[in-house]
Image: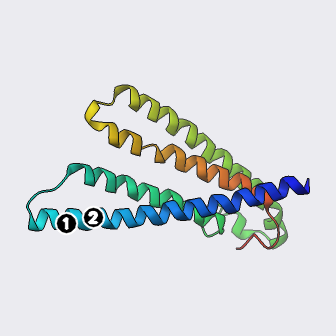
Amino acid sequence: MEHLTHFFYTSRKKLIQIEKFIAGLSLLLLLILAITQVILRNFFELGFSNIDIISRHLVLFVTFMGAALASENSQHIKIDCINSLLKSSYKEALKIPLLIISAIICAAFFWYATQFWLDEKLYAPDNETLALYLALIIPLGFFTLSLHFLLLSLTINKQDTRQ
């Protein structure tokens, strides 16, 4: 059992490193593309429409990776209003069930986002192929969040949890 817990903990840490890299790279690309587009439009009176599409989707990359990192550090928005009224002993008892419920909800969002993406793929015109594949961040983002909540519920201990 100890090896399994260590595997989940190591997987969590690797996932965090990958997400930090993707979030940082996405933010850097977003800034570079936005500045490039502004310079092209203002000084050369031209621009590329694909830069706007890529920028919109890079915002989603940063958002989903940031949400996953915030949930990892227990700094995400919590809407469990009853939990704030409970004693700390009850809060400790509810942490794992709430993490599992969050993982299930994000897994459901992943499933439906994937179904939506597959429908979009069937009917997307050829000129929207780039936007179609960039939109994969939506199901992948929900999958990442679900994985985070699941791994947190499996590896939770006193030093990992913060209020």
Up/down of 44 relative to 105, above or below: below
Image location of residue 86, percent across then percent down: 77, 68
Kindly identify which numbered label has been placed on residue 38.
Answer: 1
Residue 138 versus residue 91: which sits nearer the camera? 138
Mark 1 surroundings: few (<14), some (14-19) or many (≥20) residues within 10 A: some
Up/down of 113 relative to 71, above or below: above
Image location of residue 11, percent across then percent down: 72, 56
Q: CA distance from mark 2 to mark 1?
A: 6 Å
The amino acid type, in three-letter code, at marker 2 is Ala
Specify whether 35 is left or right of 92.
left
Up/down of 160 relative to 102, above or below: below
The amino acid type, in three-letter code, at marker 1 is Val
In which quarter of the view is residue 155 placed? Answer: bottom right
Image location of residue 149, percent across then percent down: 68, 55
Quadrant containing the C terminus in the rendered view? bottom right
Residue hosting label 2: 34
The structure residue drawn at horizontal position 70% and vertical position 49%, both measured from the top left corner, is: 101
Can residue 57 be seen in this snapshot? yes
Specify whether 98 is left or right of 158.
left
Up/down of 127 relative to 145, above or below: above
